[in-house]
Amino acid sequence: MTEPAGTPPPTVFFVSDGTGVTAETLGHSVMAQFEKLKYRQQRMPFVDTVHKAQEALQRIDEARVRDGRRPIVFSTLVNAEINRELRKAHALILDLFESFVEPLETELGMKSTHTIGRFHNATESESYKHRIEAINFSLAHDDGQSTTSLQSADVILVGVSRSGKTPTSLYLAMQFGIKAANYPLIPEDFERDRIPATLAPFKAKCFGLTIDPDRLARIRNERRPNSKYASIDNCRYEVREGETMMKKEGIAWLSSTHKSIEEIATTILRDIRPDRLIY
């Protein structure tokens, strides 16, 4: 069912006493179920005092007046007093802690800490330190700019230029603490008919990305329009040769054409580090 023509889009607020990442992530997952719905969005982080909650309340009510409809609010506020203030808003308020934490308290027979900003202590955890190390590693080994310490890599992404290697590497590092290097396959590699010599000792760590040539040509044309690099014939050649090389070398690979970064990363983790999917 679609909304009647002329109906103004709702404003969706993500309100949190911390960064707002949790509220926004869960909120987007829910709103994605309504594919044809267009909406405005605003993240409101660090709402950790009653005064800030009153300011948030004012912005939410201003959106109701402007839009002529109730805003939608995804909230991860923990403090009861701050939460009560926010609930004065004329909006649909979806309290994620109320939805999940309170039923868990009942099920487990124990109270949660109800502590604001639990993620603040994350900077002291080993997993946080691993993620920072992994991010630094991935940045240093982006696009083949460094071949030192490849023995420390969890995975080395290979594929033609602009096939999605860099964003996937950084996502793996930031979300899972995976040390991901990435290395481009170039026409010179295809002429030699083998993977670069620097990668050969680490072939078991390699995972390939490929992409539809038409999609690749569009992406490359945004960067270098009307160049041989971006021409459809060259893109078809590189993709074909890249896939042939990966098959020959026994490197597992997948197409990034219709997959999100999250899907690509999860597939890679499943194949190379399934332990990182278990917590």
Image (cartoon, rainbow, N blue to C red):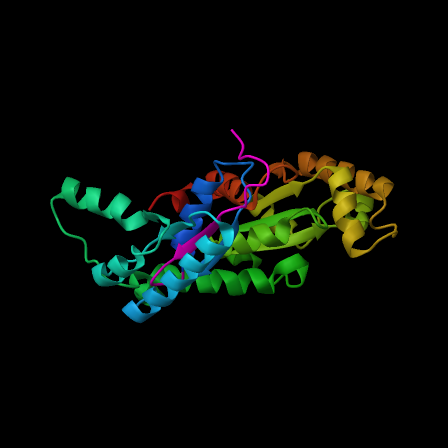
Residue 63 or residue 82, whichever sits in front: 63
Q: Does the magenta stretch include residue 76?
A: no
Q: Which residue lies furthest to the top in this view?
A: 1
Q: Which residues make up the magenta segment? A: 1-19
Q: Name the residue at 59% across, 38% down.
A: 259
Q: Residue furthest left?
A: 109
* Residue 223 to residue 53: above or below: above
Q: Name the residue at 71% across, 50% down.
A: 162
Q: Name the residue at 56% across, 60% down.
A: 138
Q: Name the residue at 36% across, 61% down.
A: 57
**Whole-percent x and y of residue 196?**
71, 51
Res. 192 in view: yes
**Whole-percent x and y of residue 30?**
43, 41
Q: How would you classify the magenta stretch by its main secondary structure? A: loop
Tell me: 231 left or right of 271. right
Res. 176 in view: no
Tell me: 149 left or right of 244. left
Residue 183 or residue 217, whichever sits in front: 217
**Whole-percent x and y of residue 4?**
55, 34
In the figure, residue 250 lies in which quadrant?
Answer: top right
Tell me: 215 left or right of 154. right
